[in-house]
Structures are given as structure tokens and as C-alpha cells.
Image (tube, rainbow, N blue to C red):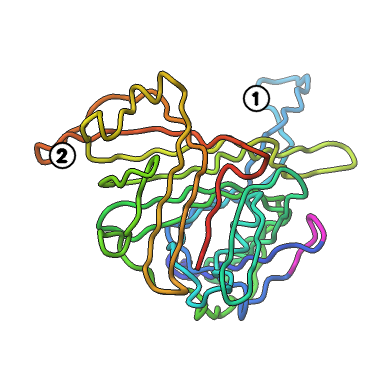
Amino acid sequence: MPTPLKWNRKTLLFAIESTYGTDENPDAATDAILAQNVQLSPMEGQDESRELELTTLGAQPTIPTGIHAKLSFDVELAGSGAAGTPPAYGPLLRGCAVAETIVAATSVTYNPVSDAHESGTFYLWIEGTLYALVGSRGTATIRIEAQKVPKISFTFTGLFVAPSAVVQASPTLTSWQKPVVATSVNTPVFTIGGTSLVLRSCEFDLGNEVVGRFLIGAENILITNKAEKIACTIEAVPLATLDPYGLALAQTTQPLVLQHGTVAGHKVGLNVPLAQMQRPAGLNQQQGIVEWPLSLVPQVNAGNDQWTLTLT
């Protein structure tokens, strides 16, 4: 009998493409991804019925159309280990309509962009089977929760490539840094409107609209729109300190700042200069303490400046 393939034997690689939809041949020595919770849909699309008139009753033959693949996974959120050096997940962010700006020995900053979106090639081995996605673009959500390791959850869509039997690559993962748990010490800053608040959790969703466009003469995966949003749960405070109801009614924008990490080369800072408070959904309680689930929407100022993620 054939030997079954083991789900837990995976290698994941990703490289930014020089030419859209052209296999960039990611290298296991430089392009390996240290991923969690990998999920793959290798052959998404539709089945076009031929609608034949037959002499007998029976199911219609079909033709697969609009074929593409979807890949989702998590990575741990940490710095690169050296200020001014991009983190190992930097290329993944670039594949989500995000620009990367490097200041040598100082910082790496990511911000949204509306044009010239980059794309990438994925190689995913599950034991001896290679699944490739080319022309991939995606979206991401940053998740920070008290007493847990912060993560970035990615979902990518790519053009279909037929799976093949290829010897599994052996990845080099030394560029991936060990994360630190989100705690009062490790996550020293969370403010809304300059007010320090006690944070249970925060999710920042890039909100990219990723679509497959399959026409005659061109097949592309595109990011056609984006709508960032923030969901956070904080300890409730007196309204004189922070009034989310009044802010929502007035459609007020306030800066939101979150910093995780305290050591140079391992600091990650999220800055949203104009975060508009939405209507609070209700009240929560944990351990007898009132908590607010808050929703905020980053607003555009001059353009492509609604948020930055800065590593220092």
C-alpha cells in the first residue's frame, strides 16, 4: 500500500515577484516562513456545466473555470533582532498592498499603498507534494492579546499551479526571532487620544479586498479596495477619562498608539493618527470588572497614511 502523507511535515516559502505571475522560485535558504495554522485550498473556482442534451437521464459533465488557490496561516509578531533590518515576515506584508521603508540601523516602517501593489510566489510542501501559488496577493490581521504571543494572520489568493511531486526543501529559519508574550512589561504603550488604557486584546485588520479577475488575455489577483478596522477590548474607565459614546456621536478622530517590545531591534509599534470611534457594541465583564469592546476605523489624511507599523 502507498505510504500516507503526514500533514505535520510542511515547508513554506515566499518570495516577492519581479514580474507579476512569474514563478520567483523562492529559496529555502532565504525565503522560508515560520508559520502556524496553515490552511490550503489548492483548487478554488467554479465547475461550468456543459448542459448537454442527452438521450438518458444523468449528471452533466463539467469544466473547471476561474481556478485559483487560497492559503492562510499565522506568523509570530516580533522584531527582526536588529534595528533597520526588515523582519522575516516583511515580504508577506509587502504582498498585502503595504510599502516598506528602511532607515539603516534605525527603523523599518510599513504603511498602506494604493498603487503598484507587489505580488509573490508561494511554495508549500506537504511531505513530497509541492503546491505553488503565483501572482499572490493578500490581506492580514495583527492580533495582540494579554498573556499570549502576538501574531499576524495572513490570507493570500494566488493563481493556480498544478501540484507536483518534488523533493521537499529544507528551510533555514534563523531570521525568525523568538517573540515575547503581551504583558504590562512587554507591551508598555497602549493609548487612545493620549490616554493610557488597560488592554485585554487588540485586532488590527488591513481589510484588503482581494479578487480574482479571470478574463481573456489577462488573469490576475488584485487588491481593489481596502477598509482597515480596529477592534479592541479595554477596561472601562470614568467618562471623564475616556468617553467612547461622546466620541462616536461627534465622529471624533483620535490617535491610537500601541507598542510591543522594549529592546532595540525587537520593538514593534502601531500608530493610527486618526482613529474614528464607532458606536460601542455593548458592555462586557470579566472577573467582575467592566470592559468595553471598542471599534475604531483608521481615517485617511493626506493619503496612504492612515496607519504605520514601525520596527525599531
Magenta stretch bounds:
19-24
Q: Residue at x 30, y 47 (%)?
A: 196
Residue 149, percent from left and from top: 34, 61
Mark 1 neighbour density, 10 Å: few (under 14) some (14–19) many (20 or more): few
The three-letter code of the residue at mark 2 reads Gln
Q: Nearer the viewer, mark 2 or mark 1?
A: 2
Mark identifier at residue 58: 1
User: Circles 2 and 1: CB distance less than 8 Å?
Assistant: no
The three-letter code of the residue at mark 1 reads Gly
Q: Who is closer to the viewer here, 243 or 1?
A: 243
Looking at the image, residue 184 lies above or below residue 176: above
Main SS, magenta region, reads: loop
- Sequence-first tag of 2 and 1: 1
Residue 12, percent from left and from top: 56, 67
Residue 24, percent from left and from top: 75, 67
Q: How many angstroms separate mark 2 from mark 1 (CA)?
A: 58 Å
Mark 2 neighbour density, 10 Å: few (under 14) some (14–19) many (20 or more): few
Residue at the right extreme of this rendering: 217
184 horizontally vs 177: left or right = left
Name the quadrant containing residue 106: bottom right
Q: Who is closer to the viewer here, 38 or 86?
A: 86
Mark identifier at residue 131: none
From the image, tell me which residue sits under label 2: 286
Residue at the left extreme of this rendering: 288
Name the quadrant containing residue 233: top left
Looking at the image, residue 90 lies above or below residue 73: below
Q: Is residue 20 magenta?
A: yes
77 horizontally vs 291: left or right = right
Q: Residue at x 62, y 37 (%)?
A: 301
Q: Residue at x 41, y 44 (%)?
A: 203
Q: Is residue 214 magenta?
A: no
